[in-house]
Image (cartoon, rainbow, N blue to C red):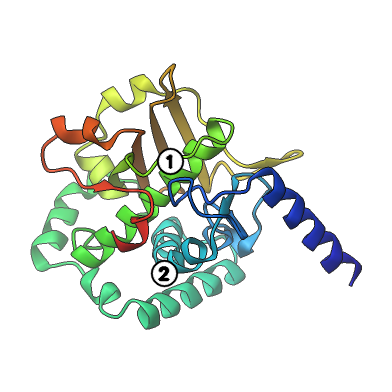
Amino acid sequence: MGEAKHNRRRKLAFLRKHPYCCFCGGATPATTVDHVPSRQMFSLKRRPKGLEVPACNACNQATRQYEQVAAMLGRIYPDGPTHADRDEVGKIMHAVDRNAPGLIEEMMPSIRQEHRFMRSKPSLPKDVAGVFNCGGPLLNRSIQSFGAKLGLALYYATTDGLIVPLEGGVAVQWYSNFAAATEGIPDSIFQLLGPPKTLTQGKWGVGEQFSYAFAIAENAKMAAYFATFRGSFAVVSWVCQDASGFDVVDDIVVHRPGQVLNC
């Protein structure tokens, strides 16, 4: 009971300091503390403190499916070092199969993709055993939504509590490890960014599981975030307080605060 009471007090203190959901444009009271990325992204759900942001219950609950898909993708490669890790990934995959019907089937590669993988194998890490189809609409929608939520959360955390307003938005690009190895990630992205960071607690860090780097404009009206999840995939989240700034880019999906759940 003592620990539960302490956790309630800590939550209430956090919400007093951070009273509004950082995903709704600043208009909705926060009622929960959201961990971004979620615990399931980390081995045995062991996650250092940090990147805890205020959320309303709707945003916290409704994005769980996207976060589950991202956790599955992020933990597919490399294989976990222990039986417990691998069992945990298996449970996540079963949950995705139950909660997002058709997504795992969608990820099965075509014969053409398998042939391309075999041709590219000499340039890939030696422990890569196979390939997935990462171009399907179900997976893309999930990672786009996950990347939008990640961008809003990182913006809040790195700007001392600024919330992207309703007229703002997030544009997301993401790269599978295969795409990064064969096509590359544009150097122009890395030229913008500061040094990589991760979650740490004392001497414990999880940089091999999750890292992020960012750049914020002087007026904080724009920001860029680059996050990697093990050796599996990377997400670039471009955040802008005025979404009309994305109009100069063709064929880009802009996720708006308050609508991230319906990406």
Which residue corresponds to the image point at 46% horizontal and 67% vertical from the top-left? 64
Query: Quick check: 104 above or below 74?
Result: below
Most foreground residue, 161 or 250: 161
Q: Amino acid at mark 1?
A: Ala
Q: Is residue 192 visible?
A: yes
Residue at numbered disc 1: 227
Which residue corresponds to the image point at 41% horizontal and 24% vertical from the top-left? 193
Q: Which badge, 2 or 1, is on the more N-terminal residue?
A: 2
Image position of 154 (left or right of 145): right
Query: Quick check: 200 above or below 74?
Result: above
Which residue corresponds to the image point at 28% horizontal and 46% vertical from the top-left? 175
Q: Amino acid at mark 2?
A: Gln
Percent x, y of residue 166: 36, 44
For the C terminus, the quadrant is: bottom left
Image quarter of residue 94: bottom left
Image quarter of residue 157: top right
Residue at numbered disc 2: 65
For the N terminus, the quadrant is: bottom right
Q: Secondary structure at mark 1?
A: strand
Q: Return the residue found at the far top.
A: 218
Q: Residues within 10 Å of mark 2 (few under 14, many from 20)?
A: some
Q: Is residue 130 visible?
A: no
